[in-house]
Amino acid sequence: MREIITLECTVCKNRNYTTTKNKKKHQEKLEIKKFCKCCRKHTVHKEIK
């Protein structure tokens, strides 16, 4: 079953994006490089609860 997760910028700690992932197939936390509006550059965004 897919669950909604929130992505947080590792630099400024803003919660910028939401996405879904399959928790049965991927138990590890998701890390994606995305654009942060506050930092105005591409940074790593990590999954949070």
Image (spheres, helix red, strand yellow):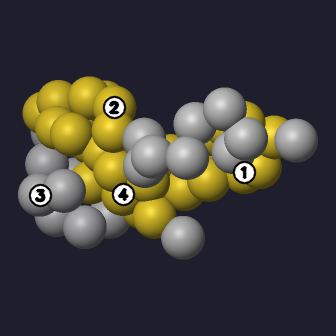
Figure check: 5 above or below 44? below
Residue 16 visible in the snapshot? no
Tag in front: 2 or 3: 2
On the image, the x and y values in percent for residue 15 come to 42, 61
Residue 40 is labelled as: none
Figure check: 32 above or below 10? above
Asked whether disc 4 touches disc 1, contact meaning CB atoms under 8 Å apart, the reply is no
Under mark 1, the amino acid is Ile
Helix, strand or loop at label 1? It is strand
Residue 8 is labelled as: 4
Figure check: 46 above or below 33? below
Residue 4 is labelled as: 1
Would you identify the image quadrant in which residue 37 lies? top left
Give the residue displayed 77% in from the left and 49% down from the top: 3
Label 1: how many residues lie within 10 Å, few (<14), some (14-19) or many (20+)?
few
Q: Distance between the residues labelled 1 and 2?
A: 15 Å
In the rendered view of the protein, which quadrant contains the N terminus?
A: top right
Give the residue displayed 27% in from the left and 54% down from the top: 9
Asked whether disc 2 touches disc 3, contact meaning CB atoms under 8 Å apart, the reply is no
Mark 3, residue position: 11
Q: Distance between the residues labelled 4 and 1?
A: 13 Å
Sequence-first tag of 2 and 3: 3
Mark 2, residue position: 32
Q: Nearer the viewer, residue 4 or 28?
A: 28
Would you identify the image quadrant in which residue 35 lies? top left
Helix, strand or loop at label 4? It is strand
Asked whether disc 1 touches disc 2, contact meaning CB atoms under 8 Å apart, the reply is no
Image side of residue 26 versus residue 7, left or right: right
Under mark 4, the amino acid is Glu
Q: Which of 48 and 43 is in front in this view?
A: 48
